[in-house]
Amino acid sequence: MKAKKIYIKTTLTIIAICLLTVTVRAQQSFVEKYNLPLYDCEHQQNFIMELKKVTIVVPDDSTAVWSRVNMYEIMLTRGGVEVSIKTESKLQESDFVGNIWVMGPIADFSHWDKFDIPVEILNSSFKIGKYSFEEPSYGFFYNSRSGVSPVRLATSGNSLDAYIQTANMLNFGFEYIVANNAIPELIGNGSHIADLNALRETIYTLRESKYYTFMISKNLPEEELEKINDDEIRNYDNHIEAFVKKMELSFPEKKIKTYFHATQEEICHFSNFFFALCRGTVWGNVVGDEIHNWKVGGAIEHEANHFLFNQVNKMAPTFFIEGIQKWYEYTVNAEYKESGFQKAREFADEDLTDVIFGRVGFFQGDKYYLISGIFTDYLIDAYGLDKFKELYKYETFDLLQGFENTYNKPLSEILVDYKKWLLP
Ligand SMILES: [Zn+2]
Protein backbone atom coordinates (compact mmCIF):
# COMPACT_ATOMS: atom_id res chain seq x y z
CA MET A 1 0.00 0.00 0.00
CA LYS A 2 2.75 2.33 1.06
CA ALA A 3 4.88 1.47 -1.95
CA LYS A 4 1.99 2.14 -4.29
CA LYS A 5 1.44 5.61 -2.84
CA ILE A 6 5.07 6.55 -3.24
CA TYR A 7 5.00 5.32 -6.82
CA ILE A 8 2.01 7.53 -7.65
CA LYS A 9 3.58 10.53 -5.98
CA THR A 10 6.83 10.08 -7.91
CA THR A 11 4.98 9.79 -11.21
CA LEU A 12 3.08 12.99 -10.52
CA THR A 13 6.26 14.85 -9.65
CA ILE A 14 7.90 13.73 -12.87
CA ILE A 15 4.89 14.80 -14.92
CA ALA A 16 4.82 18.16 -13.16
CA ILE A 17 8.52 18.77 -13.80
CA CYS A 18 8.19 17.78 -17.46
CA LEU A 19 5.32 20.19 -17.99
CA LEU A 20 7.18 22.94 -16.24
CA THR A 21 10.32 22.36 -18.29
CA VAL A 22 8.39 22.44 -21.53
CA THR A 23 6.64 25.67 -20.54
CA VAL A 24 9.79 27.48 -19.53
CA ARG A 25 11.74 26.30 -22.57
CA ALA A 26 8.95 27.38 -24.91
CA GLN A 27 8.73 30.83 -23.39
CA GLN A 28 12.50 31.25 -23.69
CA SER A 29 12.64 30.26 -27.36
CA PHE A 30 9.86 32.70 -28.24
CA VAL A 31 11.51 35.38 -26.13
CA GLU A 32 14.92 34.76 -27.75
CA LYS A 33 13.53 34.65 -31.27
CA TYR A 34 11.97 38.11 -30.92
CA ASN A 35 14.37 39.53 -28.31
CA LEU A 36 11.68 40.12 -25.68
CA PRO A 37 12.11 40.73 -21.96
CA LEU A 38 11.46 37.56 -19.95
CA TYR A 39 8.31 37.36 -17.83
CA ASP A 40 9.33 36.64 -14.25
CA CYS A 41 7.01 33.81 -13.18
CA GLU A 42 8.60 33.51 -9.77
CA HIS A 43 7.91 37.17 -9.06
CA GLN A 44 4.35 36.82 -10.39
CA GLN A 45 3.78 33.96 -8.02
CA ASN A 46 5.55 35.25 -4.88
CA PHE A 47 4.99 38.97 -5.21
CA ILE A 48 1.99 39.24 -2.86
CA MET A 49 3.53 36.91 -0.29
CA GLU A 50 6.73 38.98 -0.19
CA LEU A 51 5.01 42.37 -0.11
CA LYS A 52 3.89 42.06 3.55
CA LYS A 53 2.89 45.72 3.92
CA VAL A 54 1.81 48.40 1.47
CA THR A 55 0.30 51.88 1.38
CA ILE A 56 -2.16 52.33 -1.49
CA VAL A 57 -2.14 55.98 -2.56
CA VAL A 58 -5.31 57.36 -4.16
CA PRO A 59 -6.00 60.86 -5.50
CA ASP A 60 -7.33 63.51 -3.09
CA ASP A 61 -10.56 64.10 -4.91
CA SER A 62 -11.45 61.18 -7.08
CA THR A 63 -14.08 58.80 -5.79
CA ALA A 64 -14.22 57.00 -9.13
CA VAL A 65 -11.12 54.91 -8.41
CA TRP A 66 -12.59 53.22 -5.35
CA SER A 67 -14.20 50.15 -6.86
CA ARG A 68 -10.85 48.95 -8.20
CA VAL A 69 -8.94 49.97 -5.05
CA ASN A 70 -11.32 47.92 -2.93
CA MET A 71 -10.86 44.92 -5.22
CA TYR A 72 -7.08 45.11 -4.72
CA GLU A 73 -7.43 45.67 -0.99
CA ILE A 74 -9.44 42.44 -0.70
CA MET A 75 -6.96 40.51 -2.84
CA LEU A 76 -3.92 41.76 -0.90
CA THR A 77 -5.49 41.28 2.52
CA ARG A 78 -6.43 37.71 1.58
CA GLY A 79 -2.79 37.17 0.67
CA GLY A 80 -1.71 38.29 4.16
CA VAL A 81 -0.58 41.82 3.22
CA GLU A 82 -1.16 44.64 5.69
CA VAL A 83 -2.85 47.36 3.60
CA SER A 84 -3.41 51.01 4.43
CA ILE A 85 -5.10 53.39 2.00
CA LYS A 86 -4.21 57.09 1.98
CA THR A 87 -5.09 60.05 -0.18
CA GLU A 88 -2.04 61.76 -1.69
CA SER A 89 -2.05 64.81 0.61
CA LYS A 90 -2.25 62.60 3.72
CA LEU A 91 1.06 60.85 2.93
CA GLN A 92 3.84 61.43 5.45
CA GLU A 93 7.59 61.26 4.90
CA SER A 94 7.64 57.92 6.74
CA ASP A 95 5.27 56.40 4.15
CA PHE A 96 7.85 56.90 1.40
CA VAL A 97 10.31 54.66 3.26
CA GLY A 98 7.84 51.78 2.89
CA ASN A 99 6.11 50.09 -0.04
CA ILE A 100 3.77 52.27 -2.09
CA TRP A 101 1.15 51.44 -4.72
CA VAL A 102 -0.19 54.45 -6.65
CA MET A 103 -3.71 53.90 -8.04
CA GLY A 104 -5.54 56.43 -10.16
CA PRO A 105 -5.40 58.48 -13.37
CA ILE A 106 -2.19 60.48 -13.98
CA ALA A 107 -3.83 63.91 -13.88
CA ASP A 108 -5.43 63.27 -10.47
CA PHE A 109 -2.08 63.27 -8.62
CA SER A 110 -0.09 66.45 -7.86
CA HIS A 111 3.43 65.18 -7.06
CA TRP A 112 4.44 62.22 -9.18
CA ASP A 113 8.13 63.01 -8.60
CA LYS A 114 7.76 62.05 -4.93
CA PHE A 115 6.60 58.50 -5.79
CA ASP A 116 10.00 57.64 -7.29
CA ILE A 117 8.58 55.62 -10.19
CA PRO A 118 10.80 55.53 -13.32
CA VAL A 119 8.05 56.53 -15.75
CA GLU A 120 8.30 60.04 -17.17
CA ILE A 121 5.01 61.72 -16.29
CA LEU A 122 3.81 64.70 -18.31
CA ASN A 123 0.51 66.58 -17.80
CA SER A 124 -1.83 63.77 -18.72
CA SER A 125 0.46 61.54 -20.74
CA PHE A 126 3.63 59.56 -20.10
CA LYS A 127 6.89 58.36 -21.60
CA ILE A 128 8.89 55.16 -21.18
CA GLY A 129 12.31 55.09 -22.84
CA LYS A 130 11.91 56.61 -26.30
CA TYR A 131 8.18 55.82 -26.45
CA SER A 132 5.52 58.50 -25.73
CA PHE A 133 1.91 57.63 -24.96
CA GLU A 134 -0.44 60.54 -25.46
CA GLU A 135 -3.91 59.19 -26.30
CA PRO A 136 -6.44 59.02 -23.41
CA SER A 137 -6.77 55.24 -23.93
CA TYR A 138 -3.20 54.50 -22.71
CA GLY A 139 -2.63 53.03 -19.28
CA PHE A 140 0.49 51.68 -17.61
CA PHE A 141 1.36 49.27 -14.85
CA TYR A 142 4.71 49.66 -13.14
CA ASN A 143 6.05 47.11 -10.71
CA SER A 144 9.56 47.34 -9.26
CA ARG A 145 11.41 44.10 -9.82
CA SER A 146 12.10 41.23 -7.48
CA GLY A 147 14.54 42.16 -4.71
CA VAL A 148 14.07 45.95 -4.99
CA SER A 149 13.18 47.67 -1.73
CA PRO A 150 11.08 49.64 -0.95
CA VAL A 151 8.62 48.29 -3.49
CA ARG A 152 7.00 50.73 -5.90
CA LEU A 153 3.87 50.00 -7.93
CA ALA A 154 1.67 52.19 -10.06
CA THR A 155 -1.58 51.45 -11.83
CA SER A 156 -2.35 54.55 -13.83
CA GLY A 157 -3.11 56.03 -17.21
CA ASN A 158 -4.14 59.03 -19.25
CA SER A 159 -7.83 58.78 -18.32
CA LEU A 160 -10.08 57.19 -15.73
CA ASP A 161 -11.08 54.52 -18.23
CA ALA A 162 -7.45 53.69 -19.06
CA TYR A 163 -6.71 53.42 -15.34
CA ILE A 164 -9.65 51.05 -14.80
CA GLN A 165 -8.65 48.87 -17.77
CA THR A 166 -5.12 48.69 -16.42
CA ALA A 167 -6.32 47.87 -12.92
CA ASN A 168 -8.20 44.86 -14.30
CA MET A 169 -4.99 43.06 -15.26
CA LEU A 170 -2.90 41.12 -12.78
CA ASN A 171 0.48 40.72 -14.44
CA PHE A 172 3.33 41.13 -11.98
CA GLY A 173 6.11 39.53 -14.03
CA PHE A 174 7.28 42.58 -16.03
CA GLU A 175 8.53 45.89 -14.70
CA TYR A 176 6.48 47.85 -17.27
CA ILE A 177 3.36 47.06 -19.22
CA VAL A 178 1.71 49.73 -21.35
CA ALA A 179 -1.75 48.97 -22.68
CA ASN A 180 -4.02 50.74 -25.15
CA ASN A 181 -7.67 49.89 -24.41
CA ALA A 182 -6.34 46.92 -22.41
CA ILE A 183 -4.29 45.64 -25.40
CA PRO A 184 -0.59 45.46 -24.49
CA GLU A 185 1.72 47.58 -26.67
CA LEU A 186 4.94 47.72 -24.67
CA ILE A 187 6.58 45.43 -22.15
CA GLY A 188 9.85 46.03 -20.40
CA ASN A 189 12.33 45.10 -17.71
CA GLY A 190 14.77 47.94 -16.99
CA SER A 191 16.14 49.22 -20.29
CA HIS A 192 15.08 46.08 -22.17
CA ILE A 193 11.87 47.32 -23.76
CA ALA A 194 9.86 45.61 -26.50
CA ASP A 195 7.41 47.23 -28.90
CA LEU A 196 4.63 44.66 -29.29
CA ASN A 197 2.94 46.62 -32.10
CA ALA A 198 6.01 46.28 -34.30
CA LEU A 199 6.02 42.57 -33.47
CA ARG A 200 2.34 42.21 -34.45
CA GLU A 201 3.26 43.39 -37.93
CA THR A 202 6.06 40.85 -38.12
CA ILE A 203 4.16 37.80 -36.92
CA TYR A 204 0.64 38.11 -38.34
CA THR A 205 -0.91 38.30 -41.82
CA LEU A 206 -4.28 39.90 -42.40
CA ARG A 207 -7.47 38.51 -43.91
CA GLU A 208 -10.85 40.23 -44.00
CA SER A 209 -14.36 38.78 -43.93
CA LYS A 210 -17.77 40.46 -43.59
CA TYR A 211 -17.51 40.89 -39.82
CA TYR A 212 -13.92 40.00 -39.01
CA THR A 213 -10.38 41.17 -39.55
CA PHE A 214 -8.34 38.04 -38.96
CA MET A 215 -4.75 38.23 -37.75
CA ILE A 216 -3.20 34.92 -38.70
CA SER A 217 0.11 33.86 -37.20
CA LYS A 218 2.85 33.03 -39.69
CA ASN A 219 4.08 30.48 -37.16
CA LEU A 220 0.98 28.28 -37.59
CA PRO A 221 1.68 24.88 -39.19
CA GLU A 222 0.34 24.20 -42.69
CA GLU A 223 -2.45 21.88 -41.49
CA GLU A 224 -3.83 24.67 -39.29
CA LEU A 225 -3.62 27.29 -42.06
CA GLU A 226 -5.59 25.00 -44.37
CA LYS A 227 -8.55 25.31 -42.02
CA ILE A 228 -8.97 28.96 -43.02
CA ASN A 229 -11.06 28.38 -46.14
CA ASP A 230 -14.05 30.29 -47.56
CA ASP A 231 -16.64 27.89 -46.11
CA GLU A 232 -15.21 28.14 -42.65
CA ILE A 233 -15.08 31.93 -42.79
CA ARG A 234 -18.70 32.07 -44.02
CA ASN A 235 -19.64 29.96 -40.97
CA TYR A 236 -17.98 32.47 -38.65
CA ASP A 237 -19.89 35.34 -40.30
CA ASN A 238 -23.20 33.44 -40.21
CA HIS A 239 -22.72 32.79 -36.55
CA ILE A 240 -22.43 36.52 -35.86
CA GLU A 241 -25.74 37.13 -37.66
CA ALA A 242 -27.53 34.36 -35.78
CA PHE A 243 -26.30 35.53 -32.39
CA VAL A 244 -27.02 39.22 -32.95
CA LYS A 245 -30.59 38.40 -34.04
CA LYS A 246 -31.32 35.99 -31.22
CA MET A 247 -29.94 38.31 -28.53
CA GLU A 248 -31.47 41.46 -30.03
CA LEU A 249 -28.12 43.25 -30.21
CA SER A 250 -26.59 45.66 -32.72
CA PHE A 251 -24.18 44.50 -35.39
CA PRO A 252 -20.59 45.46 -34.59
CA GLU A 253 -19.72 48.92 -35.93
CA LYS A 254 -16.23 47.86 -36.96
CA LYS A 255 -14.85 44.53 -38.09
CA ILE A 256 -13.80 42.45 -35.09
CA LYS A 257 -10.05 42.06 -34.86
CA THR A 258 -9.58 38.35 -34.27
CA TYR A 259 -6.28 36.54 -33.80
CA PHE A 260 -5.35 32.97 -34.57
CA HIS A 261 -2.18 32.43 -32.55
CA ALA A 262 0.21 29.57 -33.13
CA THR A 263 1.43 29.07 -29.57
CA GLN A 264 0.57 29.74 -25.94
CA GLU A 265 3.43 32.28 -25.90
CA GLU A 266 1.77 34.25 -28.69
CA ILE A 267 -1.70 34.30 -27.19
CA CYS A 268 -0.34 35.22 -23.73
CA HIS A 269 1.85 38.07 -25.03
CA PHE A 270 -0.69 39.70 -27.31
CA SER A 271 -3.83 39.36 -25.20
CA ASN A 272 -2.47 40.60 -21.87
CA PHE A 273 -2.65 37.13 -20.32
CA PHE A 274 1.05 37.15 -19.40
CA PHE A 275 0.39 35.41 -16.08
CA ALA A 276 -0.70 32.34 -18.08
CA LEU A 277 2.87 32.03 -19.40
CA CYS A 278 3.58 30.49 -16.00
CA ARG A 279 0.79 27.92 -15.86
CA GLY A 280 -2.42 26.79 -17.50
CA THR A 281 -3.68 26.88 -21.06
CA VAL A 282 -5.46 29.81 -22.70
CA TRP A 283 -7.88 28.66 -25.42
CA GLY A 284 -9.37 32.04 -26.16
CA ASN A 285 -10.29 35.38 -24.64
CA VAL A 286 -11.79 38.77 -25.36
CA VAL A 287 -9.52 41.68 -24.47
CA GLY A 288 -10.53 45.27 -25.18
CA ASP A 289 -12.03 45.16 -28.67
CA GLU A 290 -10.15 42.05 -29.77
CA ILE A 291 -10.78 38.32 -29.83
CA HIS A 292 -7.84 35.97 -29.33
CA ASN A 293 -7.80 32.27 -30.17
CA TRP A 294 -5.20 29.59 -29.76
CA LYS A 295 -4.94 27.91 -33.22
CA VAL A 296 -7.37 28.34 -36.10
CA GLY A 297 -11.03 28.28 -35.12
CA GLY A 298 -10.21 27.87 -31.48
CA ALA A 299 -12.93 29.21 -29.24
CA ILE A 300 -14.01 31.78 -31.83
CA GLU A 301 -17.80 31.38 -31.50
CA HIS A 302 -17.70 31.35 -27.71
CA GLU A 303 -15.50 34.45 -27.63
CA ALA A 304 -17.50 36.23 -30.34
CA ASN A 305 -20.63 35.78 -28.20
CA HIS A 306 -18.84 37.39 -25.26
CA PHE A 307 -17.57 40.17 -27.50
CA LEU A 308 -21.06 40.93 -28.85
CA PHE A 309 -22.81 40.76 -25.48
CA ASN A 310 -20.18 43.19 -24.13
CA GLN A 311 -22.36 45.81 -25.87
CA VAL A 312 -24.63 45.57 -22.84
CA ASN A 313 -21.80 45.81 -20.29
CA LYS A 314 -18.13 44.86 -20.32
CA MET A 315 -17.88 44.55 -16.56
CA ALA A 316 -20.76 42.21 -15.68
CA PRO A 317 -20.18 39.50 -13.03
CA THR A 318 -18.58 36.31 -14.38
CA PHE A 319 -21.66 34.29 -13.36
CA PHE A 320 -23.79 36.22 -15.86
CA ILE A 321 -21.09 36.64 -18.52
CA GLU A 322 -20.93 32.85 -18.79
CA GLY A 323 -24.62 32.41 -17.89
CA ILE A 324 -25.91 34.27 -20.93
CA GLN A 325 -23.35 32.44 -23.08
CA LYS A 326 -24.65 29.05 -21.91
CA TRP A 327 -28.23 30.24 -22.29
CA TYR A 328 -27.54 30.88 -25.98
CA GLU A 329 -25.84 27.52 -26.38
CA TYR A 330 -28.88 25.88 -24.74
CA THR A 331 -31.25 27.55 -27.22
CA VAL A 332 -29.40 25.93 -30.13
CA ASN A 333 -28.82 22.55 -28.46
CA ALA A 334 -31.71 21.01 -26.49
CA GLU A 335 -29.69 17.99 -25.42
CA TYR A 336 -27.03 20.21 -23.93
CA LYS A 337 -29.71 22.18 -22.09
CA GLU A 338 -30.97 18.91 -20.59
CA SER A 339 -27.50 18.23 -19.19
CA GLY A 340 -27.59 21.75 -17.72
CA PHE A 341 -30.90 20.99 -16.01
CA GLN A 342 -29.46 17.77 -14.60
CA LYS A 343 -26.51 19.62 -13.10
CA ALA A 344 -28.70 22.42 -11.69
CA ARG A 345 -31.09 19.90 -10.09
CA GLU A 346 -28.20 17.91 -8.65
CA PHE A 347 -27.05 21.04 -6.80
CA ALA A 348 -30.52 22.55 -6.22
CA ASP A 349 -29.92 22.83 -2.47
CA GLU A 350 -26.75 24.88 -2.86
CA ASP A 351 -27.21 28.61 -2.17
CA LEU A 352 -25.99 30.28 -5.38
CA THR A 353 -25.43 33.66 -3.69
CA ASP A 354 -21.73 33.00 -3.02
CA VAL A 355 -20.83 32.01 -6.57
CA ILE A 356 -22.92 34.84 -8.06
CA PHE A 357 -20.93 37.30 -5.94
CA GLY A 358 -17.57 35.67 -6.71
CA ARG A 359 -16.97 34.48 -3.14
CA VAL A 360 -16.87 30.91 -4.46
CA GLY A 361 -14.69 30.32 -7.55
CA PHE A 362 -16.71 30.05 -10.76
CA PHE A 363 -14.19 28.04 -12.76
CA GLN A 364 -14.62 24.53 -11.30
CA GLY A 365 -14.91 22.31 -14.33
CA ASP A 366 -18.20 22.88 -16.12
CA LYS A 367 -20.40 22.87 -12.98
CA TYR A 368 -21.09 26.59 -12.72
CA TYR A 369 -21.06 27.15 -16.47
CA LEU A 370 -24.01 24.75 -16.71
CA ILE A 371 -25.80 26.06 -13.61
CA SER A 372 -25.38 29.75 -14.49
CA GLY A 373 -26.99 29.01 -17.87
CA ILE A 374 -30.00 27.41 -16.20
CA PHE A 375 -30.36 30.24 -13.67
CA THR A 376 -30.17 32.72 -16.57
CA ASP A 377 -32.79 30.63 -18.37
CA TYR A 378 -35.05 31.02 -15.33
CA LEU A 379 -34.59 34.81 -15.25
CA ILE A 380 -35.31 35.15 -18.98
CA ASP A 381 -38.20 32.69 -18.82
CA ALA A 382 -39.82 34.56 -15.93
CA TYR A 383 -38.98 38.18 -16.77
CA GLY A 384 -37.71 38.35 -20.37
CA LEU A 385 -34.45 39.14 -22.14
CA ASP A 386 -34.78 42.93 -21.83
CA LYS A 387 -34.97 42.71 -18.04
CA PHE A 388 -31.95 40.42 -18.02
CA LYS A 389 -30.02 43.02 -19.99
CA GLU A 390 -30.96 45.60 -17.34
CA LEU A 391 -29.57 43.35 -14.62
CA TYR A 392 -26.45 42.71 -16.70
CA LYS A 393 -25.50 46.38 -16.44
CA TYR A 394 -24.66 46.03 -12.74
CA GLU A 395 -21.18 45.11 -11.53
CA THR A 396 -20.68 42.69 -8.66
CA PHE A 397 -20.34 45.38 -5.99
CA ASP A 398 -23.73 46.83 -7.03
CA LEU A 399 -25.54 43.61 -7.80
CA LEU A 400 -27.85 43.29 -4.77
CA GLN A 401 -29.30 46.66 -5.65
CA GLY A 402 -29.34 45.52 -9.28
CA PHE A 403 -31.73 42.64 -8.48
CA GLU A 404 -34.03 44.95 -6.48
CA ASN A 405 -34.08 47.60 -9.20
CA THR A 406 -34.57 45.17 -12.07
CA TYR A 407 -37.02 42.66 -10.63
CA ASN A 408 -38.49 44.56 -7.62
CA LYS A 409 -37.46 41.60 -5.49
CA PRO A 410 -34.41 40.77 -3.39
CA LEU A 411 -32.08 38.05 -4.71
CA SER A 412 -33.03 35.78 -1.78
CA GLU A 413 -36.65 35.72 -2.97
CA ILE A 414 -35.63 35.20 -6.58
CA LEU A 415 -33.55 32.19 -5.53
CA VAL A 416 -36.60 30.68 -3.78
CA ASP A 417 -38.71 31.22 -6.93
CA TYR A 418 -35.92 29.70 -9.04
CA LYS A 419 -35.84 26.55 -6.95
CA LYS A 420 -39.62 26.12 -7.31
CA TRP A 421 -39.26 26.53 -11.09
CA LEU A 422 -36.31 24.13 -11.20
CA LEU A 423 -37.98 21.38 -9.15
CA PRO A 424 -41.67 21.49 -10.07
ZN1 LIG B 1 -16.57 32.24 -21.64
Image (tube, helix red, strand yellow):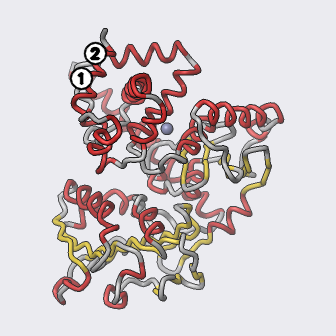
Q: Which mark is residue 420?
A: 2
Residue 117 rendering spot, x and y as whole percentages: 38, 83
Residue 344 higher or lower than 51, as above or below: above
Cβ atoms at labels 1 and 2 below 8 Å apart? yes
Residue drawn at x 40%, y 58% is 170
Position of the C terminus, as image quadrant, is: top left
For disc 1, the neighbor class at 10 Å (few under 14, some 14 to 19, many from 20) is few
Residue at mark 1 to residue at mark 2: CA–CA distance: 7 Å
Name which quarter of the figure residue 101 lies in: bottom left
Numbered-mark total = 2
Badge 1 amino acid: Val
**Where residue 259 sits in the image (x, y, percent)?**
66, 49
Q: Nearer the viewer, residue 237 or 223?
A: 237
Please tell me the numbered disc located at residue 39.
none
Q: Which of 106 and 117 lies nearest the eye of the viewer?
A: 106
Q: Residue at x 81, y 31 (%)?
A: 231
Farthest right residue in view: 230
Q: Residue furthest top?
A: 424
388 relative position to 306: left or right: left
Who is closer to the viewer here, 135 or 205? 135
